[in-house]
Image (tube, rainbow, N blue to C red):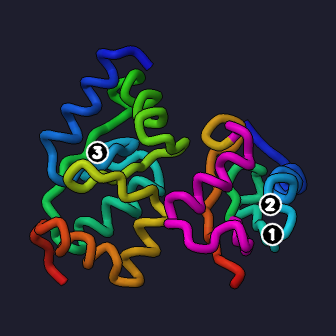
Amino acid sequence: MSLKLEEIKKLIKEAMPDAEVAIQDLAGDENHYSATIKSKIFTGKSKIDQHKLVYKALKGKMGIELHALALNTMEIK
Amino acid sequence: MNENTNIKIKNIIDKNEVCLFMKGTPEVPQCGFSLAVSNVLKHLEVKFNGINVLDDPEIREGIKIYSDWPTIPQLYIKGEFIGGCDIIKEMFEKKELQAKLTEKKIPFKN
C-alpha cells in the first residue's frame, strides 16, 4: 500500500487540468499525504462532492493503494 | 454489496440519530482520523453511537459503497451523510457543524 506523490499529482491533473495541486508526504512513508487542491471544477459544489471528485480522479486507489490523504479543496472563482 | 449488508447498514443509520462509522470505539479509537472526529463530537458533548467497522468486515466494505465514500470515518446525522474527517474538522472550525446540529435538532454544548 503506497503511492508516489508524483503519481497522485498526475492523476489529479489528468482529471482536472486547471487544478493547482500542492501535496505533502506527511510521514515520509508514501502512504500519508495531505493535499491542497484549487480548481474551477469545485465551484458551487458541496465539500462532499468536491472530495468525491478528487477520489474519482484517483480511480479507486483511495483507501486501497493509498491509506491516507487529507484533503483541502478550494474553488477558484 | 449484498442485500443483507445494505439493510444492516440502513438499520444502523435509521436507529442512531448521530452515528459515526469508525475504526475502533469512541473510548479506544484505532486510527487517528477516527480519533479526531470522535474528539470533535465529544468536545461538543454530542451523544453519538460509534460503529466499530473493524468488528464487521461486511460493514467496513459495505459502508464505503453505501455512502459512495472510500474512507473511514464517516459521520451520519439523522440519516444524512455529513462527511469524513477533513470535512468534519473544517465544518467544526467554521461552526458549520454546530449549525448542522442545530438544524437537525441534536443537542450539543457550544
Q: Amino acid at mark 1?
A: Ala
Q: Mark 3 sits on what residue?
A: B25
The boundaries of the magenta stretch are A35-61
Do labels 3 and 1 touch, CB within 8 Å?
no
| SS for callout 3 | loop
Marks 1 and 2, how far apart at CA: 6 Å
Nearest the viewer among A20 and B34 is A20
- Chain on which label 3 sits: B
Mark 2 belongs to chain: A
Of residues A29 and B61, the one nearer the viewer is B61
Kind of residue sitting beneath label 2 = Met
Task: Say if labels 3 and 2 share a chain.
Answer: no
Who's the residue at 61% across and 40% down the image? A63
> Can you give x and y, in whole percent of width and height, for residue B14 in the image?
17, 40
Whole-Å distance between the Cαs marked 3 and 2? Answer: 37 Å
Q: Amino acid at mark 3?
A: Thr
> At which x and y percent is residue A12?
80, 56
